[in-house]
């Protein structure tokens, strides 16, 4: 299918065309630049990132949020980044099992992405795919990260609002204060709050927030039981409130972070580890080898052949 026809079906609301476009972006980021450049992004789409340690119930919470939004007539996309399969490199699709009740809803689109070794909790093409979903016209986009712990902070440079989901078992105060995830939260959600220790964890988080510099947004600490859809309405309300409260100040910062990642990736497009290893092996064999000189002049000029006319 050529790009013109793909775009035509895409703007007609075809989920099939949407899936094809996402696959094209995911598998060929460089080749899809022209396609991405032609998209008209929706300024009204709310992008919320949901992150937190493994076992905190992120997928269950997202499923409850999606259910309520769908009941309100909202169009919702879920981008769930799963660990890569060691066999085929693709996503393990665990989110599709956990979110099965919403998978066939006509206003809901759920897509699994493989992290493919990314250490920040996101797929390498997550920025582009979120923009594709924006162009499709979803009201809400929910991005669930892998759940890799403290390195999982890239989502803050992608989403308008970042939810950090914890459980009572996360209540070790020292560990909470050390965690890099604590720095990026716009909303804290203590999930599985019917368990012992939930109230104590909420108090620890609130105390920690008192030490933050004052800003335009006061980070709320919400308690929820996602399996029973408790406090889901309040979580959605806080997502909407946060976006309204900080959109004018946060948006340029988000755009700069996205642009930085896209420019870096574009400039590194023609550099592979295999080529780098081969060229380093040759260069390192010389007695005067200096790694910093090598990097300064990398990549080397391409050899050209002289042809006689």
Image (tube, rainbow, N blue to C red):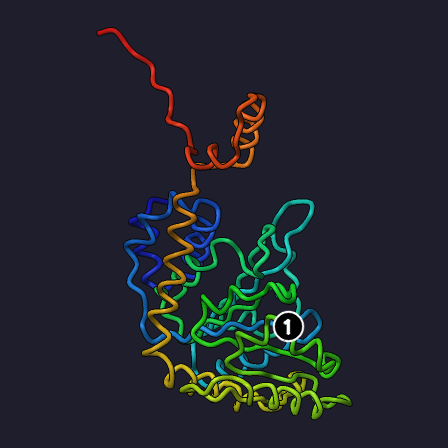
Task: Name the side, left or right, on which 207 lies relative to 79.
Answer: right
Q: Quadrant of the C terminus?
A: top left
How many other residues sit within 10 Å of disc 1, few (<14), some (14-19) or many (≥20)?
few
x and y, in percent, of residue 288 in the image: 53, 24
Q: Residue lying at the far front in this picture: please name it.
A: 288
x and y, in percent, of residue 23 in the image: 47, 51
Q: In this view, does 22 lie above or below 305?
A: below
Q: What element carries label 1?
A: loop
x and y, in percent, of residue 271 in the image: 46, 37
The residue positioned 41% from the left and 53% from the top of the image is 21
Q: Residue lying at the far left in this picture: please name it.
A: 309
Total numbered labels placed on residues in the image: 1
**Which of 216/7 is in front?**
216
The residue positioned 65% from the left and 89% from the top of the image is 202
x and y, in percent, of residue 32 in the image: 37, 47
Q: Residue lying at the far right in this picture: please name it.
A: 196
In the picture of the structure, the residue carrying the numbered disc 1 is 179
The residue positioned 53% from the left and 89% from the top of the image is 220
Task: Name the side, left or right, on which 289 lies relative to 199.
Answer: left
**Which of 104/96 is in front?**
96
Q: Quadrant of the N terminus?
A: top left
**Which of 129/97 is in front?**
129
The residue positioned 28% from the left and 55% from the top of the image is 38
């Amino acid at each position: 299918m050529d790009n013109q026809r793909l775009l035509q079906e895409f703007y007609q609301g075809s989920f099939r065309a949407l899936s094809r476009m996402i696959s094209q972006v995911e598998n060929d980021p460089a080749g899809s630049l022209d396609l991405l450049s032609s998209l008209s992004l929706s300024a009204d789409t709310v992008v919320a990132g949901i992150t937190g340690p493994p076992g905190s119930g992120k997928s269950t919470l997202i499923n409850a949020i999606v259910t309520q939004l769908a009941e309100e007539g909202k169009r919702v996309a879920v981008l769930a980044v799963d660990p890569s399969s060691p066999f085929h490199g693709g996503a393990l699709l665990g989110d599709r099992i956990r979110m099965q009740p919403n998978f066939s809803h006509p206003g809901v689109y759920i897509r699994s992405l493989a992290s493919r070794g990314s250490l920040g909790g996101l797929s390498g093409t997550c920025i582009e795919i979120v923009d594709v979903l924006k162009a499709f016209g979803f009201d809400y986009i929910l991005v669930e990260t892998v759940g890799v712990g403290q390195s999982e902070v890239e989502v803050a440079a992608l989403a308008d609002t970042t939810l950090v989901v914890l459980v009572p078992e996360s209540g070790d105060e020292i560990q909470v204060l050390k965690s890099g995830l604590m720095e990026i939260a716009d909303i804290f959600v203590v999930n599985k709050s019917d368990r012992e220790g939930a109230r104590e964890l909420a108090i620890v988080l609130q105390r920690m927030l008192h030490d933050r510099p004052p800003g335009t947004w006061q980070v709320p600490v919400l308690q929820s039981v996602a399996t029973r859809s408790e406090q889901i309405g309040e979580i959605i309300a806080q997502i909407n409130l946060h976006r309204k409260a900080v959109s004018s100040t946060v948006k340029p910062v988000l755009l700069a972070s996205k642009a930085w990642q896209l420019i870096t990736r574009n400039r590194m497009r023609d550099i592979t580890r295999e080529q780098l290893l081969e060229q380093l092996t040759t260069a390192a064999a010389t007695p005067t080898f200096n790694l910093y000189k090598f990097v300064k002049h990398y990549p080397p000029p391409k050899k050209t052949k002289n042809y006689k006319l």
